[in-house]
Image: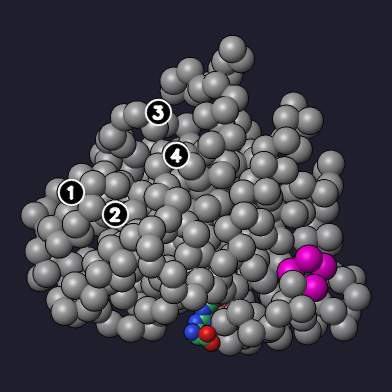
Amino acid sequence: MLFFRNYSFKMVSNQIQSKFRGSLLGSLMGDCLGAPFEGELVSSGDKIIIQRYFDKMEKPEYEGPFKKYTDDTAMMKSVAKFLVTTPEPDLNYLAKLFVNEYYNEPKRGYGQSVATVFEKLKHSKYTDIFRPASEQFDGRGSYGNGGAMRIAPISLYFHNDLENMIKLARDSTRITHGHMLGINGAILQALAIRQAFLLDPTETVKADEFCNTLLKQIHEVEKSYFEDLEDNSEDLPYCAKIKQIKYFLNQEFTDDLQEEIIENLGHGISAYDSVPIAIFCFLKAQNPIPRIETNNVFRRTIQFAITMGGDTDTIACMAGAIVGAHLGEEAINKTLLKHCEKYDDIIALAHKLYENRQLQI
Ligand code: F2R
Ligand code: MG
Ligand code: MG
């Protein structure tokens, strides 16, 4: 049996493959299952509806129409294809994949402004792939969560190479997002997926340790943007959010607390208001949560993320990518999975991603 080093436990090749599939499928499932609730506020009554929605789909006899994926999965597929088809990362090729995917299926619920980037990329014939994004929002760039929602393939592919993972997370995001919060949000999500990937799936994640590692890593990333500040992580945006995650994880979970969590961590379309709550959902769902009735940690994570309301497809997609990277494909209820559009394409893509990575090492 082949064992791989550099992991916190001995990981065999079929476990690695399972984690590749688990993370990409988690991303797809969060997107498909969360999309019908996008933009909504979730009341106590809605939580019961969401519980029934999941219970119904887990019944083998239920044959509803499949849940369509949105821009989150469309763009994640492009990131995976980019890593599969090029021996060396070619960002111009990634920009073309994004644009082609968009023009083939523009009605996947893309962000209102990112379409302008695609148009400019196409019309400029990809001469400077970072320029259109840098011109968005009067030159401030987008801080949307579009970079973070599609990042999973990069974390998986570069799980043994932190430096290059961060570099590619940054550069791949810069094709559409020029704002520091959009870029660093994508890096934070990539770091969370990578850390979950490296952990033993048979063990419950230790939330405090997980947050401390993230804090150290994102502090390194953020401090380069704020060189003029004292070396005080309180002042760094995502560092401050991780401290809030730690605080909220240690409180008793009630409806009032949930409101406070949403107020502080956010549940919106910006990376700053969505990546931290996705990480919180993953960590909180390690243990039972009141009124999320399932023993399956994978389902609990996605269902809990959807009950946060707001940008549900994207928050559940990001939480799903993290839990899938930890637990692998085995943790996924196959009856639930079958309600998600093109799940078999995602399994094939995860397999290709794994195989291509093996060829490169
Ligand atoms: N677009 C949506 N949801 C809207 C409803 C869709 C509906 N259900 C449907 O089917 O039609 N969801 C998707 O967009 C998010 C990812 O967005 P992305 O890729 O980051 O796009 P964009 O356009 O760059 O940013 C999104 C919005 O954020 C605000 N914004 C960003 N930067 C800003 C800045 N510097 N100043 C002011 N506002 C900024 C803008 O409102 C942008 O339009 C995901 O949720 C995905 O699911
Ligand atoms: Mg979407
Ligand atoms: Mg969304």
What residue sits 58% from the left and 19% below the top?
4
Queried on whether the Cβ of the residue with tag 1 lies below 8 angstroms from ligand 3, the answer reads no
**Res 300 label:** 2
186 sits left or right of 196 in the view? right
Say above or below: 29 vs 205. below
> Dot 3 surroundings within 10 Å: few (below 14), some, or many (20 or more)?
some
**Res 257 label:** none
| 4 or 1: mark nearer the eye | 4
Specify which label sits upstream in the sequence, 4 or 3: 3
| 4 or 3: mark nearer the eye | 4
Give the CA distance from mark 3 to mark 1: 19 Å
Q: Return the residue nearer the eye: 111 or 335.
A: 335
Q: Which stretch appears magenta?
A: 96-100
Amino acid type at mark 2:
Arg
What residue sits 10% from the left and 70% below the top?
256
| 4 or 2: mark nearer the eye | 4
> Dot 2 surroundings within 10 Å: few (below 14), some, or many (20 or more)?
many
Q: Marks 3 and 1: CB-CB under 8 Å?
A: no
Q: Return the residue nearer the eye: 103 or 224.
A: 103
Q: Marks 2 and 1: CB-CB under 8 Å?
A: yes
Queried on whether the Cβ of the residue with tag 3 lies below 8 angstroms from ligand 3, the answer reads no
Find numbered disc 4 in the image and state the secondary structure of the residue it sits on. helix
- Residue 32 at what x, y percent from top left? 48, 68
Find numbered disc 1 in the image and state the secondary structure of the residue it sits on. loop
Specify which label sits upstream in the sequence, 4 or 1: 1
Query: For mark 4, what is the residue?
Result: 330
Q: Return the residue nearer the eye: 285 or 231.
A: 285
**Res 200 label:** 3
Queried on whether the Cβ of the residue with tag 2 lies below 8 angstroms from ligand 3, the answer reads no
Give the CA distance from mark 3 to mark 2: 19 Å
Specify which label sits upstream in the sequence, 3 or 1: 3
